[in-house]
Amino acid sequence: MTFVQLIDCRTSRFDEMNRLVDTWLEQTGGRRSATHSLIGKDRSDGSHFIEIVEFPSYEEAMRTSNLPETDRIFHDMIALCDEMPVFTDLEVVRDEQLYVANVRRFFEVVAAEDDLPPLDGLLAENYHGHDPANEQDTIGMDAMRREIREWRAGFDFAFTVEDRIAEGDKVCTRWTWNGRHTGEFLGIPATGRDVTITGTTVFRCGVDGKIVEGWWQYDRLGLMEQLGALDALER
């Protein structure tokens, strides 16, 4: 379970403390287990700072805490503080990245059975999709809905998420798509074949969490081959 440590301190020498953190990062490279560090400054009190450090577990946090470099930096940090810092140890009981949740929901919705539900809560009206397999970019929610319907009309399918990485306003998903060709798709009559393709999608989300832009990369040529659309060319 993820473990987070909060360090609440007051200092008028933040620049020196910031350099101290850089020194610690350099000296403990390859041996520390901290995975994420965030420092925030109180808008109503310029001397009040809170550092949030994330670890894979409490045990890993203690291992990093016991490094000799950590002990030295700790005493140097206290000397820069106006008062003794306060440490709070937290076991993370819920961790929800809201952009990730919206992207996860998108892949579930487009592959769901029955009629395609409204996408208003998932896509922005001005959604811009980039797909090298298309002659033109997909501009607007309505255009995206039409494209999704074309895939749903041609296949019964589902996505399997292999990896998902989020940073800032972007969420990258590496997926496997498994489908059965049950209807006409790009002029190819239904073949009843089971097909599989792999791909990666990078979505950019707006401040409201809705998806505003997407970059799709997948094996469209491989799909056409599985459907037999390349047979005539190979003969």
Image: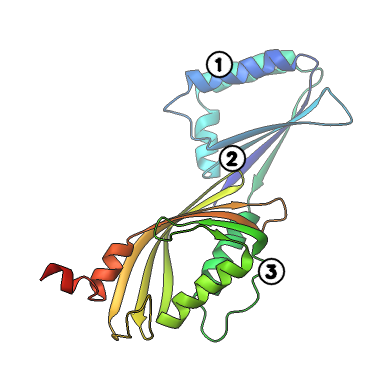
Residue 38 lies, with reference to residue 24, above or below; the image says: below
Q: Residues within 10 Å of mark 3 (few under 14, many from 20)?
A: few
Question: Which residue is drawn at the image coordinates 51% and 44% (left, top)?
Answer: 56
Which residue matches tag 1? 23
Of callouts 1 and 2, the N-terminal one: 1
Query: Split into 4 quadrants, where in the image is the C terminus?
Result: bottom left
**Could you tell me the amino acid type at mark 2?**
Glu
Disc 2/disc 3 C-alpha distance (Å): 34 Å
Residue 61 lies, with reference to residue 108, above or below; the image says: above
Of callouts 3 and 1, the N-terminal one: 1
Q: Position of residue 57 (x, y in %)?
A: 53, 45
Q: Secondary structure at mark 1?
A: helix
Q: Nearer the viewer, residue 161 or 72?
A: 161
Q: Residues within 10 Å of mark 2 (few under 14, many from 20)?
A: many
Disc marking residue 54: 2
Disc 3/disc 1 C-alpha distance (Å): 47 Å
Q: Nearer the viewer, residue 88 or 2?
A: 2
Q: Secondary structure at mark 3?
A: loop
- Report the mark closest to the observer, 3 or 1: 3
Q: Position of residue 51 (x, y in %)?
A: 69, 32
The reply to whether callout 2 and callout 3 are in contact (CB within 8 Å) is no
Q: Position of residue 217 (x, y in %)?
A: 40, 55
Question: Which residue is drawn at the image coordinates 51% and 77% (left, top)?
Answer: 149
Q: Nearer the viewer, residue 153 or 6?
A: 153
Q: Position of residue 171 (x, y in %)?
A: 54, 51
Which residue matches tag 3? 120
